[in-house]
Amino acid sequence: MSQIDLAWGAGPSARYEALAERFRPIFARIAERAVERELTRELAFEPIKWLREAGFGAVRLPVEAGGLGASLPELANLLIELSEADSNVTQSLRVHFGLTEDVLNSRDDARRARWFKRIAAGEYAGSAWTEAGDAALAAFGTRLTETDGALRLNGAKYYTTGSLYASWIDVGATGTQGEEVSVFVRTDAPGVSIVDDWDGFGQILSVSGTTTFTEVAVAPEEVVLDTERFRYGAAFYQLYHLATIAGIGRAITRDVARAVAARNRTHTHANGPRSAQDPQVLAVVGRARGAAYSAAAIALQAAGSLQRAFEAHFAGDEAAEERANAIAELETAQAQTVVTNLILDASTTLFDALGASATRKPLGLDRHWRNVRTLSSHNPRIYKDRIVGDFAVNGTLPPYQWRIGTPAIEPARQAAE
């Protein structure tokens, strides 16, 4: 059934329905056991395999390169639909689609050809950027060294989302000259160890645990300067969260509507013989649906700004490209707090439409709040309203990239200690 028939509105393009129909049977298959996987911590190897076989990871590639040539709004809408089925699966593919976007923007023809072939063949990439504990803010502890002309990678990462499902890992590292680089290594390379020790209460199947690198051999062509990666990267990764959260909003609506329709028990002070006939209960469901509708609409509006940034990259006007990148960052920033608030609220108030039995663990309804709360803890949203306000008042452009770590000790403080 089309998005229009489901009252979610038209897709982002005239061809979107034809594009989505290719994947909807797989999304439905993924949704069938999503709660069971969540409750038993069954990793999503099968859903990832189904998507790989259908070419989902290659949707952004040009048709001539083995992809479907999807636009960024089309990708965002597909991610919303996938997230309604199981947001763990969507989150696991976040860095893969980020790498794909980076390759699409690359001016290195050899790199483009190499990665187009890999992505079209169904190879995925996972993440290894964040370092836990006392990792420095200014530089990565994970380092690339060179001995007798051979490059080696050593270090440890946490939040290595999707790597256990992937063929490659995108690693943030300090290069041989102290520069920031991205290093790409195979997950099965000697010296790579991936552990599913993610202990967060949400997105528990996104395999976001620890990966260590011990004397891992690195091919020179798999090292990219951080300054050469696509400029709207921060906006892209935030848009990805927005689409995932919007999809969770649709899952909330689906689950609470089904539960209300099936509910026979009622209260003495209710407004009807069944919950499905109680105006107050119906209003709770309606508000949740309105939140999901609005979240998706906002996410798709932000996706349009990234599409403009992508197109500006090839237009030959550097100033216009920089402006488009800044606007994309601002649009995703001002969307972030609104979308997360809408769906966090819906994930809580859904229980108002149901009885206390809805809190039973086997139903898994708590997963929606846990997953949204986990996703909305990334790239702290408390800073976004300030960044947007600073632009509105002072014209200040936003930062392009976020890092987390321990800042260096200030000289005055260091002397006092």
Image (cartoon, grey):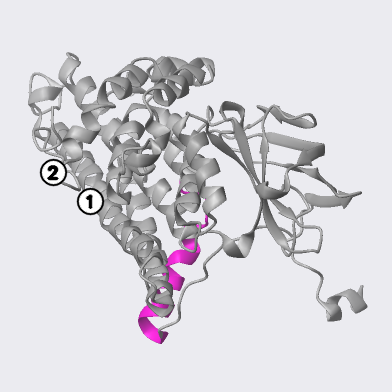
Quarter placement of the N terminus: top left
Residue 123 magenta-drawn?
no
Residue at point 39%, 52% (across, down): 239
Residue 48 picture location, percent across and down: 46, 24
Query: Residue 54, which numbered label?
Result: none
Precedes in sequence: disc 1 or disc 2: 2
**Residue 345 relative to residue 143: left or right:** left
Marks 1 and 2: CB-CB under 8 Å? yes
Alpha-carbon span between mark 1 and mark 2: 9 Å
Relative height, residue 270 to residue 340 (above, below) = above
**Residue 211 relative to residue 298: left or right:** right
- The residue carrying pointer 1 sits among few (fewer than 14), some (14 to 19) or many (20 or more) residues within 10 Å by Cα, namely many
Residue 411 picture location, percent across and down: 85, 79
Query: Residue 9, which numbered label?
Result: 2
Residue at point 59%, 35% (across, down): 200
Residue 378 magenta-drawn?
yes
- The residue carrying pointer 2 sits among few (fewer than 14), some (14 to 19) or many (20 or more) residues within 10 Å by Cα, namely few
Say which quarter of the image contains residue 281: top left
Task: Tell me which amino acid carries mark 2.
Answer: Gly
Query: Residue 297, which numbered label?
Result: 1
Quarter placement of the C terminus: bottom right
Q: Which residues are magenta?
A: 376-394
Main secondary structure type of the part rendered in magenta: helix
Residue at point 86%, 51% (across, down): 146
Relative height, residue 411 to residue 120 (above, below) = below
